[in-house]
Amino acid sequence: MTKTRHSHLYGTIITTAVVVFISIGYLLAPWFHQLSSVDPQGISIAAFRHARKQFKAPAKNPWAEIDEGEAAQIHSLVQQSVNLTDSLNGVGAGDKKVIYRIETLRPNKTDVVDYLDNNGPQPERWARVAMLEFRHNDAFNVDYMVGPLPITNATSMLPLSYCYNSGKNWVQMPLSDGLDLMAWALKIGERVTDITQDLLGATVNALDPSDPDALVMGWRPALIESGRMVHWLEFFGPGMKSDGRTLLPQGLYVKFDTPSTNHQDWVVGQWFYNGLLYDNDTVLREAMRSPTFERLNLNHDGEWTDTEDFGSSMAERDMPPPLSVQPYGPRYHLDRDESYVSWMGFSFYLSTNQATALSLFDIRYNSTRLIYHLGLQEALAHYAGTEPLQSGLEFLDTFFGMGSMMFSLVPGVDCPGHAEYLDMSYHKGGKMYTNRNAICVFEFTSDAPLQRHTSAYSVSVSRNTYLVVRSVSTVGNYDYTIDYVFYLDGSIEVKVRASGFIFSAFHAEPRSSLLTRDDSTSEYGYRIHPAVHTSMHDHVISFRADFDICGPNNTLIRTAIEPISRKYHWDEPEVPGVRNTMHMVHSAIKHETGLDWPTNGREMYLITNTNATNKWGETRGYRILPGSGISNPSHLTILNSTALGRSAAWSASDVWILRNHPDTEPASAHHLNYMDPLTPLVDFEKMVNGENIEDEDLVVYFNLGGHHVPTSQDVPNTLMHTSASSVMFVPFNYFDADVSRAVRQGVRIDRRPSDNDHGTKKKEKENGDGKEEIKRPRHVPRESEVDGEVAYFGAHYTSPLKVEHEMLSPDLSHYLKERDEGEVGGWKTVRNHVGGGLPGLFAGKERGSHGEEDGEGRERWDW
Ligand SMILES: [Cu+2]
């Protein structure tokens, strides 16, 4: 072997070794039995395993959630100083303050960047403390900042308002306690037992909310204004088994007016039944005595609301399905202490929040930051309908806690059997809660290849393996599965899939009439049961992406793909006039604005750094575009929603591009906007104020979701593949070429007849066929890669493996349990203590606990 040849081969081996080292995990030895300590390609499994075990984040996670020790310190500090603190009008006799939430106040971007990029000091750690403050007849949620931590003499407690563009640090709550309202509602319900028994065939049971035969009352605000709230309530049918309460509206409604938090001021308003308003229950009773009064069909719970069918059997169902396995263990690296992940060139930190669930921070590719922050902001579901409950029904789900409702995932089903899990911990009402296995991380190989090509000489195909970070937020009737997906080419996808029970409308149909189709009611949905209608609604789910493409200063380029008629001199004389063709038109967006996804994909939105070019002189950037799903993610259909007020202006467009003020405008929303829609803490509309956005730090807000018009196929549950939407960030001249080439795994198969087959190749070589030489790949596969005419790039399985049963069907008997350290082999149950669904939505719904305790042993509505 010549020196040159030797050097080349040496280089190849080094390169290949590095690539293989990165791309093959030989971990989790318990799952792997057949492999010797050194794999066939000469890579030490032990070394890889060691490296993975030793893996450490490059820095402390600056966004880590407050831990139990910190929370306890803060709690006692605030308790000591609570009477001294007064941001409002003074504490008087009978007034009260309750510590509600303690969580991390995320540090300023400038401080974090200095820490991560310039070896600057670790950013100061501060907490956000939310207090419930009761003053006379009014209730307030007041936000404070406490820091720096750990607590010393330098630690102070200050009003937190710098990150809210209202300038306030408080929200007046229209109710001091939602459970009070619910209890009152049940009392009113009991007062009309004769009416409900007659019309609905059942009664409420205020004494036993778990009574399986009792009616419950669902609720929506008709008006929220300066501490006043007007509510419409509807009776819903009994049905504890399936949790399908939202499928059981019964068509009797009552209005409540609560002008203050004082019960003495509360007034029962009109009643509504079969399209008619009744001034009070007495008037309704009188009407019911009339022989012409029409009683309507009812909805009864039954098998139809059950999500599961354990009874049916067929040969195919009784065979287990194909599943993903990971016999050598994961290939990503995870530092659990810092919630830091690295995979195939990507790295990022994870951070959780009670309202907004999971966020990713400092997303880098090959150590270069792409995105500083990527995370959920708010999830809106806005309904419409012909009856009082549905007509203005809207939910801003962070109010209920998209993070605290990240319930435990079910291994092997929510995520593949080989996934790893992280917990979600949070401090509320004086207690630390942990949702076990709330986040899963796993690699998955798609059924479809990443790349392929068949040439005359060979076929080459690469696997599409990607990394997923997943969590599910179950907010009442709906389950949102949120994925952050990383691809080998540097692409990132954010995807939301919804499942769970729809919130249905009552279909008013007299009992005397036959089941007929009524065109007038198909304006808002479709009939799915004798007295149930689906209710059209829009899901608009806001995400924030703080891009830093080759540095913080970026420009959004809008590249239009347009038809054009142009004359080209070479066309003559055959084409004497213009040629009808197309071209691109590039323009920078100069001012903050909202954009919609262009029809026919005729424009590309590119986040670029106009000062950074790739090897070819082209501006480096990432394209933002709708990804996979059922359709383009949509914005809210309703214009200037009466119900939303100013609380969710971000829902009006698909995408927003804003000048980034990461410290003073860190979010598009606040989870208490729901309670103060006219003067919200964070008013997104104010953030879009025409600032110049060329060559500035930019932030992109984009919406996922869609127009959901449920049909009979949404019963009993909406299916995820019919309700998925995603947005992708795809490198766009960011790299010099496709970077997945270096990390992907696949195979090239020589399609030419082998030497043994008629000696064709030998003849070609002998003939000195130059064309053949040029066409042949120049990479000389190592011997270990070559199996005859089959050349693998990256690793592949070389021998049979034993797959542990645990990977195929994880042991779920430990679900919601954790090992009791004091007892060998003992498991103790840990429940997700989150109040059992959606307190405040239904009175009488929950089995057991309604909500959190307020620290005085009293149950309180989960604000
Ligand atoms: Cu929906």
Image (cartoon, helix red, strand yellow):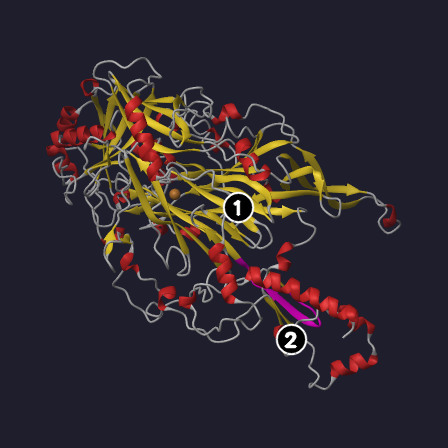
Crowding at mark 1 (Cα within 10 Å: few <14, some 14-19, many 20+)? few
Quadrant, the N terminus: bottom right
Q: Quadrant of residue 427?
A: top left
Mark 2 close to ligand 1, CB under 8 Å: no
In the foreground, 83 or 615? 83
Crowding at mark 2 (Cα within 10 Å: few <14, some 14-19, many 20+)? few
Which residue was labeled with disc 2?
A: 783
Secondary structure mainly formed by the magenta segment: strand
Q: Earlier in the sequence, mark 1 or mark 2?
A: 1
Q: Quadrant of residue 259?
A: top left
Q: Looking at the picture, does residue 511 appear above or below residue 443?
A: above
Relative image position of residue 105 (x, y in whole percent): 43, 32
In this rendering, position of residue 127 left or right of residue 788: left
Q: Which residues are magenta?
A: 453-465
Asked if labels 2 and 1 touch by Cβ distance under 8 angstroms, the answer is no
Please tell me in which quarter of the rendered image ligand 1 is found. top left
In this rendering, position of residue 486 left or right of residue 712: right
Relative image position of residue 114 (x, y in whole percent): 57, 34
Let me know if residue 509 is in the magenta part. no
Q: Residue furthest front?
A: 153
Q: Looking at the picture, does residue 226 appear above or below residue 409?
A: above
Relative image position of residue 43 (x, y in whole percent): 56, 67
Q: Looking at the picture, does residue 739 appear above or below residue 659?
A: below
Which residue was labeled with disc 1?
A: 58
* CA distance for labels 1 and 2: 37 Å
Which residue does the image show at 69% across and 86% down from the upper left? 756
